[in-house]
């Protein structure tokens, strides 16, 4: 029964009011046909519109936005890409058909020896690809820490994936001040701090993973990962 | 008041009683008395919904500047003391980000009566959030996280440039000279114009700014190295929005 747009019945003086009338009037206004003020709860509306991160597993609709904020320095020594103990990861990101994933990441990192660490963006277990210089099929993308990588450097997203500074002096992060996320004056850095990723519709864990070579150790701190999606209908 | 009824208050049969109390209870089930009960058409007011989901006031999540007319807005200070293009009261939640898109022409010209000729005037433009100049990574600098500004030296008495948001900060392109204090290059915000983009640069993109949670004025400011000159800000188009991450 649809929500009533008019009286069920117009009662007149001296007319009848039967049990059937009472039941029918009630049926017009039960929950099955109406909506509640609670249906406009801002958290629910925001989820439906893709503005929040609550996972379906915790009663939400879908993860459209997510974050990971970790200041603590954590290390990894492994020749294969993998997560740190506190993962730089947003899980269960739901990407609609023809949608795009937007990522910003900003961190500080160094390796126990120069040029022995790398970082990459992953969707699930798949390393994100980038069209290589000179064309050809997209190839897996990673950024390697540079010749000054034994001292602290900035690791950031750009429009072309991840990039790292390679300054002669150490990077001194400060999480308490206004600063541009991603990008910067970095050799080989693409424009901007937002990396836009195309992927098939699905549910993804979006992460930043790390490896080292030669048994060295990479240390990563001051991590700021933000992930959001955009649907295009 | 009970919640919105999921079922009839009572089912009446031919032999059942229907009292005055019944009639009142049925009405009480459907009147609007507060959250948890039914909604009204004004709950769907578009401005109310936009506010609920953070797309408009009363929390400023989106803001803008559309400002033309350079003679009314100029700076001739050697420091960032003047009022720039500003969106005020932007509310950033914890771990939120501010995205800033900007395009404007900035010209300089001598103040009538000022000393001439006076070439090599330095103009600078910077982004401020909450009155604090925004920093960015610069691997060529000690500490690498440094105040961001763009600086251009004009070698004649009048000149015009174009400033836009690039993802890594602000960018600037010097254009043609002009002689009367008004833009001869542009406008940069005519209808149908790609925002910030140009064949001069491929870097146009939103600037993404991280700040602690708070309420901020987001502002583009400029300064000029010589008090005999002033900077005209024209065709300013600024768009600011906040992204929340829960």
Image (cartoon, rainbow, N blue to C red):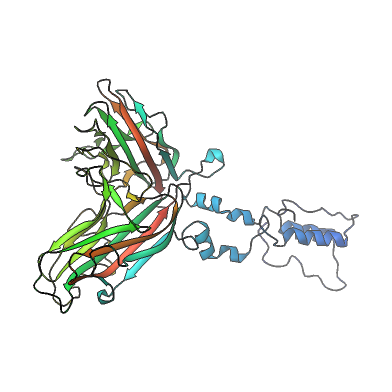
Q: From what the image shows, is residue B161 above or below residue A198?
A: below
Q: Is residue B11 left or right of residue B71?
A: right
Work out whether residue B117 can be spotted: yes
**Residue B95, percent from left and from top:** 43, 46
Seen at 21% across and 54% down, the residue is B202
Viewer-proximal residue among A41 and A68:
A68
Q: From what the image shows, is residue B150 above or below residue B161?
A: above
Seen at 70% across and 61% down, the residue is B33
Viewer-proximal residue among B46 and B78:
B78
Viewer-proximal residue among A32 and A156:
A156
Q: From what the image shows, is residue B209 above or below residue B85?
A: above
**Residue A24, percent from left and from top:** 76, 59
Q: Is residue A34 left or right of residue B206?
A: right
Work out whether residue A35 can be spotted: no
Looking at this view, name the residue that lies furthest to the top. A215
**Residue A58, percent from left and from top:** 55, 39
The picture quadrant where one finds residue A30 is bottom right
Looking at this view, name the residue that lies furthest to the bottom. B113
The picture quadrant where one finds residue A114 is top left
**Count of labels shown?**
0
**Residue A36, percent from left and from top:** 64, 55
- Image quadrant in which the N terminus of chain B is located: bottom right
Viewer-proximal residue among A96 and B236:
B236
Looking at this view, name the residue that lies furthest to the left. B117
Q: From what the image shows, is residue B4 above or below residue A7?
A: above
């Amino acid at each position: 029964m649809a929500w009533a747009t008019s009286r069920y019945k117009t009662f007149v003086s001296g007319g009848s009011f039967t049990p059937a009338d009472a039941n029918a009037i009630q049926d017009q206004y039960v929950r099955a046909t109406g909506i509640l003020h609670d249906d406009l709860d801002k958290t629910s509306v925001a989820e439906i519109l893709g503005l929040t991160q609550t996972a379906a597993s915790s009663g939400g609709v879908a993860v459209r936005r997510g974050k990971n904020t970790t200041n603590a320095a954590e290390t990894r020594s492994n020749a294969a890409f993998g997560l740190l103990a506190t993962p730089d990861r947003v899980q269960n990101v739901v990407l609609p058909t023809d949608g795009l994933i937007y990522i910003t990441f900003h961190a500080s990192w160094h390796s126990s020896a120069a040029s022995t660490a790398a970082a990459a963006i992953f969707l699930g277990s798949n390393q994100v690809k980038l069209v290589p210089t000179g064309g050809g099929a997209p190839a897996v993308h990673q950024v390697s820490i540079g010749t000054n990588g034994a001292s602290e450097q900035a690791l950031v997203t750009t429009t072309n994936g991840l990039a790292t500074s390679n300054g002669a002096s150490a990077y001194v992060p400060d999480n308490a001040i206004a600063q541009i996320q991603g990008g910067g004056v970095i050799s080989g850095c693409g424009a901007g701090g937002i990396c836009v990723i195309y992927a098939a519709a699905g549910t993804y864990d979006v992460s930043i993973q790390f490896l080292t070579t030669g048994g060295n150790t990479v240390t990563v701190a001051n991590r700021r990962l933000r992930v959001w999606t955009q649907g295009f209908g | 008041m009970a919640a919105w009824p999921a079922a009839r208050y009572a089912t009446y049969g031919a032999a059942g009683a229907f009292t005055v109390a019944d009639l009142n209870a049925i009405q009480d089930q459907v009147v609007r008395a507060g959250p948890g009960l039914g909604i009204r058409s004004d709950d769907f007011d578009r401005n109310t919904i936009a506010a609920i989901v953070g797309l408009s006031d009363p929390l400023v999540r989106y803001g803008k500047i559309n400002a033309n007319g350079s003679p009314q807005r100029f700076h001739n200070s050697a420091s960032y003391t003047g009022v720039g293009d500003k969106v005020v009261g932007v509310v950033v939640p914890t771990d939120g980000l501010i995205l800033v898109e900007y395009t404007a022409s900035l010209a300089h010209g001598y103040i009538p009566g000022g000393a001439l000729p006076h070439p090599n005037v330095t103009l600078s433009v910077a982004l401020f959030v909450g009155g604090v100049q925004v920093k960015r990574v610069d691997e060529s600098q000690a500490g690498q996280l440094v105040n961001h500004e763009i600086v251009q030296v004009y070698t004649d008495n009048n000149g015009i440039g174009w400033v836009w948001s690039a993802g890594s900060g602000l960018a600037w392109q010097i254009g043609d000279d002009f002689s009367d204090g008004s833009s001869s290059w542009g406008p940069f915000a005519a209808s149908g114009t790609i925002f910030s983009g140009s064949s001069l640069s491929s870097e146009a993109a939103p600037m993404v700014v991280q700040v602690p949670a708070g309420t901020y004025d987001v502002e583009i400011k400029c300064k000029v190295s010589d008090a005999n000159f002033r900077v005209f800000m024209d065709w300013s188009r600024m768009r600011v929005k906040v992204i929340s991450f829960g």
